[in-house]
Image (tube, grey):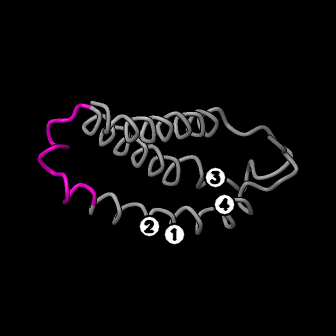
Amino acid sequence: MSRALPASAMARHHLPWARAALLLVVPSGAMMFAAHATDFAGNPAFRLKLIFLALAGLNALLFHRGVYRSVNGWDTNTRVPLIARAAAVASLLLWIGVISAGRLLAYL
C-alpha cells in the first residue's frame, strides 16, 4: 500500500509474529482434532480447511523461495512485481478460506 515502506523491513517485523502465531495455532488445532477425530474425518468443512491450509503453505513457500529472493530490487519506491502481488492476494483469500472453513466445522 505504501511504496516508501521497505518490504524487507516489514518482513523482518511481521514474520517472527506469524511464526509465533503458527506455533500456537497448530498445537491447538491438533488437540482439537485429537478430541474429535471421528467427527472431523467425515466433515467436508474440515477437508476444505486442510486443502486451504496446504495451499496457503505452498503459496508462502513459493513466495519466499521465488520472488521474495529478489526483494532488494523492488524493496522501496518501485512497483511490486505482479507475481508478488498475486501471492499476497492468494494468501489473503486462502487464509480467509481457512478461517471460514474452520468456523463451518460446527455447522456441517
The picture quadrant where one finds residue 13 is bottom right
The amino acid beneath tag 2 is Leu
Q: Are marks 4 and 2 in contact (CB under 8 Å)?
A: no
Q: According to the image, label 3 marks what residue?
A: 70
At which x and y percent is residue 48?
A: 30, 34
**Mark 1 to mark 3: distance in Å?**
25 Å
Q: Main secondary structure of the magenta part?
A: helix
Q: In the picture shown, does residue 10 fall above or below 76?
A: below
Q: Are marks 4 and 3 in contact (CB under 8 Å)?
A: no
Describe the element under mark 2 as helix, strand or loop.
helix
Question: 29 left or right of 34?
Answer: right
Question: 15 left or right of 57?
Answer: right
Badge 1: residue crowd in 10 Å (few <14, some 14–19, many ≥20):
few
The amino acid beneath tag 1 is Ala
Q: According to the image, label 4 marks what residue?
A: 11
The circle drawn on residue 24 is 2
Pick out the residue farthest to the left: 38
Pick out the residue farthest to the front: 107
At which x and y percent is residue 83?
A: 59, 35
Badge 4: residue crowd in 10 Å (few <14, some 14–19, many ≥20):
few
Q: Are marks 2 and 3 in contact (CB under 8 Å)?
A: no
**Mark 2 to mark 3: distance in Å?**
30 Å
Residue occupying the point 72% across, 59% down: 10
Q: Are marks 4 and 1 in contact (CB under 8 Å)?
A: no
Q: Tag count in the figure?
A: 4
Q: Please provide the residue range marked out in magenta.
A: 32-44
The amino acid beneath tag 3 is Ser
The circle drawn on residue 20 is 1
Q: Which quarter of the rendering shows the C terminus?
A: top left
